[in-house]
Image (cartoon, helix red, strand yellow):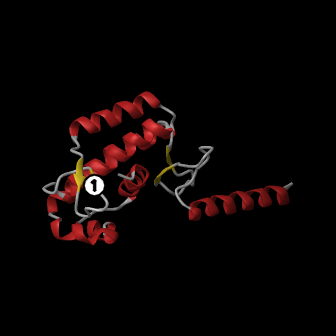
Amino acid sequence: MDFIRYAERSAALVNAELPDEAALREHLADRSWLHRSLVPADVASLQDFQSRLRQVFEASDADDVPLVVSLLNDLLAAHPVTPMISDHDPANLHMHVANKAASVSELLVGEALMGLANLVCDLGATRLGTCSEVRCDHVFVDTSPNQSRRYCSDRCSSRANVAAFRARQKAASAS
């Protein structure tokens, strides 16, 4: 399992707008093999999970380690994960987080939880954040060496920097 990738996918899942199956298919554009297994119940299940998972990112952003651990443990208890060795490529055995009978939502939930649980244990419980750009509510995973990430994307970072620059210019011209 690539836990960092799973953790980053969990942020993408929280950030995704999933009003219907079409939106979920679009979210899974790079995993088209899952499209044939989608059912309407996956959308409702993931919508509920998104709001609960957002709380983990918000607690981490607030440096509330006990709450991050508690929320993740509650989610792990509510959504038990069954890791399985995958042999679809016998030359490259690896772990999957759910068996072949798992629904799409169970697979995505399992990946998100295992990714975040391992990231929290390996890198710390404050490596998750919410974007500092005031017009954005996206979340992100901070894997930077000095834990300095503040924005969900380069676009938001640029928008915030341009806004700060313009505010400084306006303040300087007003003086």
Residue at 27% x, 38% y is 76
Q: Is residue 33 depicted above or below 77 in this figure?
A: below
Q: What residue type is labelled 1?
A: Leu
Dividing the picture into quadrants, the one containing residue 38 is bottom left
Looking at the rendered structure, the number of numbered marks drawn on it comes to: 1
Q: Residues within 10 Å of mark 1 (few under 14, many from 20)?
A: many
**Going by the image, does 144 lie left or right of 87?**
right
Q: Position of residue 50 (x, y in %)?
A: 32, 50
- Most foreground residue, 125 or 50: 125
**Residue drawn 34% across and 37% down?**
72
Q: Residue 150, how many percent across, how many down?
A: 58, 50
Residue that carries the numbered disc 1 in the rendered image: 108
Q: In which quarter of the image is the C terminus?
A: bottom right
Return the residue found at the far left: 101
On screen, residue 60 above or below 155: above
Relative to residue 98, is residue 6 drawn left or right? Answer: right
